[in-house]
Image: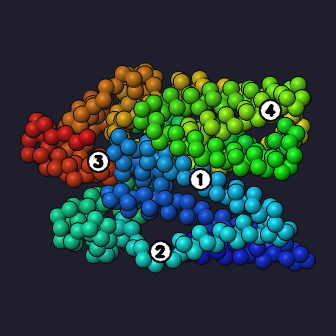
């Protein structure tokens, strides 16, 4: 409710700016206030909504981290890709509201789109009246009875039900495993260690994916599409705005493509396909702008549309999915925070330099982005291991295998077969991730991750204590 109220306050500060009262300063202050509220929202609401509806509750400060830890191996990629698709639909809605307002009087052009944000903030504020605090938040603060009540309500069970108590135990184990017990977290210096866990390498894989998403030119096209059409392709202002709206429709449609292919094609192939698609689109764009003729410029328009289609289907969701998968639980929250910082920093850079590049070097802007995309291909090919259909425990073993056997991590991922849970423990022991085989390794790791298999994991742990994995217990 507080963050919704913050956004409402920021919007009011902005729309009430009047000439003669230093409106620019007031507008900037309003934007900062709204940005604070929106920043909190984007790190809280997706996590709250996603984990409540998926029944298995494991809270974290980053939505993608939470989804990765709470999802089954078979649908982890899909769930985070859906989150990326929602971003595209939000961009589509915002663009068409702005487009419609552009035909109104001068005040309406900017006041209405800003004021319209209040509606969504009110939905958040009013809706939260009937929604509880998260179980993890309550249990972290030792409010056990309230936490049990919320868990029972989310699952439609009684507080005394065995499953309710099991979920409470899982969350408490998760809190202790992730360093939240006593409100202690993983130290920042842990991000810069390597060895068998390869924390630094894994963090840099996530950071580099977010960096490449931005410097590949996505926001040069998304933010400046009408300007690119008006200045580079010489369309009228009205036609450029309309084509910008159509571009957003294409963007939203192709953002759903990854939902259907992410678990079939895998991360590496989508990264590579998307990069090739983006690079060739930029080649088409700058090539068609060189002649400077209206006919050739139409080819440049096609290039911009194929670029946004390639981006929406691949590079839009992947940099949010990959860091959440590839980082281990000990550093996942902080490593994802570093990745997100990388995204916004280079987002800012590209948004600031793109208009200057178009004015100074014209079609060379698109040549620049074509070359940058070409540079991504060897980085992805040689350094990005595949994580498709891998459990989070298997991903830990991929990096331990690469380190111990002195081979590339891409090769380690290819050579490591898909493992049953008892095989995961054996491999973890082989590569020194654990010092003894107790039969509880996977169960303990699953409890840390808070995956939907936690009930089975606890059974596994009990059976492991009785007689190991010889009974054939297997969690998918």
Q: Residues within 10 Å of mark 1 (few under 14, many from 20)?
A: some
Picture residue at 42% right of the left edge, 77% below the top: 130
Picture residue at 55% right of the left edge, 60% below the top: 42
Picture residue at 53% right of the left edge, 23% below the top: 382
Tell me the number on the disc at residue 89. Answer: 1
Q: Residues within 10 Å of mark 2 (few under 14, many from 20)?
A: some
Tell me the number on the disc at residue 298. Answer: 4
Report x, y in % for residue 167.
26, 61
- Dot in front, 4 or 3: 4
Q: What separation in Å lies between label 4 and label 1 (alpha carbons)?
A: 26 Å
421 left or right of 5 in image: left
Q: Secondary structure at mark 1?
A: helix
Q: Earlier in the sequence, mark 1 or mark 2?
A: 1
Say which residue label 3 marks: 446
Quick one: 399 or 45, which is closer to the camera?
45
Q: Is residue 170 above or below residue 20?
A: above
Is any atom of residue 441 visible in this view? no
Q: What separation in Å lies between label 3 and label 1 (alpha carbons)?
A: 33 Å
Please report contact status of discs 4 and 3: CB closer than 8 Å, yes or no. Answer: no
Q: Secondary structure at mark 4?
A: helix
Q: Secondary structure at mark 2?
A: loop
Please report contact status of discs 4 and 1: CB closer than 8 Å, yes or no. Answer: no
Q: Earlier in the sequence, mark 2 or mark 4?
A: 2
Q: Residues within 10 Å of mark 4 (few under 14, many from 20)?
A: some
- Dot in front, 4 or 1: 4
Q: Earlier in the sequence, mark 3 or mark 1?
A: 1
Tell me the number on the disc at residue 128. Answer: 2
Report x, y in % for residue 347.
69, 47
């Amino acid at each position: 409710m507080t963050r919704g109220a913050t956004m409402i306050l920021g919007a009011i500060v902005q729309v009430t700016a009047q000439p003669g009262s230093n409106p620019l300063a007031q507008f900037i202050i309003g934007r900062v206030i709204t940005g604070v509220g929106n920043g909190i929202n984007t790190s809280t609401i997706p996590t709250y909504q996603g984990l409540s509806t998926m029944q298995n509750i494991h809270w974290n400060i980053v939505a993608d981290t939470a989804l990765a830890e709470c999802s089954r191996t078979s649908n982890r990629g899909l769930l985070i890709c859906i989150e990326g698709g929602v971003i595209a639909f939000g961009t589509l809605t915002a663009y068409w509201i702005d487009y419609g307002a552009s035909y109104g009087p001068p005040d309406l052009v900017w006041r209405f789109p800003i004021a319209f944000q209040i509606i969504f903030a009110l939905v958040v504020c009013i809706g939260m009246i009937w929604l509880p605090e998260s179980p993890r938040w309550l249990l972290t603060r030792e409010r056990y009875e309230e936490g049990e009540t919320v868990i029972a309500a989310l699952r439609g069970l009684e507080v005394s039900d065995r499953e309710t108590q099991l979920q409470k135990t899982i969350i408490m184990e998760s809190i202790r495993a992730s360093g939240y017990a006593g409100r202690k977290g993983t130290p920042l210096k842990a991000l810069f260690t390597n060895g068998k866990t390869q924390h630094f390498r894994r963090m840099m894989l996530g950071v580099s994916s977010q960096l490449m998403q931005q410097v590949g030119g996505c926001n040069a096209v998304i933010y400046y599409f009408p300007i690119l059409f008006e200045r580079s392709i010489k369309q009228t202002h009205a036609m450029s705005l309309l084509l910008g709206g159509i571009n957003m429709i294409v963007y939203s449609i192709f953002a759903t493509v990854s939902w259907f292919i992410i678990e079939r094609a895998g991360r590496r192939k989508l990264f590579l396909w998307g990069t090739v698609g983006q690079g060739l689109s930029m080649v088409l764009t700058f090539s068609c702008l060189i002649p400077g003729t209206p006919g050739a410029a139409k080819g440049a328009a096609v290039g911009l549309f194929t670029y946004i289609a390639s981006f929406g289907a691949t590079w839009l969701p992947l940099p949010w999915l990959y860091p959440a998968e590839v980082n281990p639980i000990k550093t996942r929250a902080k490593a994802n925070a570093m990745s997100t910082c990388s995204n916004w920093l280079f987002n800012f850079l590209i948004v600031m330099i793109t208009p200057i590049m178009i004015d100074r070097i014209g079609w060379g802007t698109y040549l620049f982005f074509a070359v940058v995309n070409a540079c991504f291909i060897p980085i992805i090919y040689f350094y990005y291991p595949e994580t498709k259909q891998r459990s989070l425990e298997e991903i830990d073993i991929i990096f331990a295998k690469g380190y111990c056997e002195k081979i590339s991590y891409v090769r380690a991922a290819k050579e490591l077969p898909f493992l049953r849970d008892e095989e995961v423990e054996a491999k973890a022991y082989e590569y020194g991730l654990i010092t003894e085989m107790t039969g509880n390794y996977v169960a303990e790791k699953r409890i840390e991750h808070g995956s939907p298999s936690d009930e089975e994991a606890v059974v596994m742990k009990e059976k492991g204590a009785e007689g190991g994995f010889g009974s054939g217990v297997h969690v998918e």
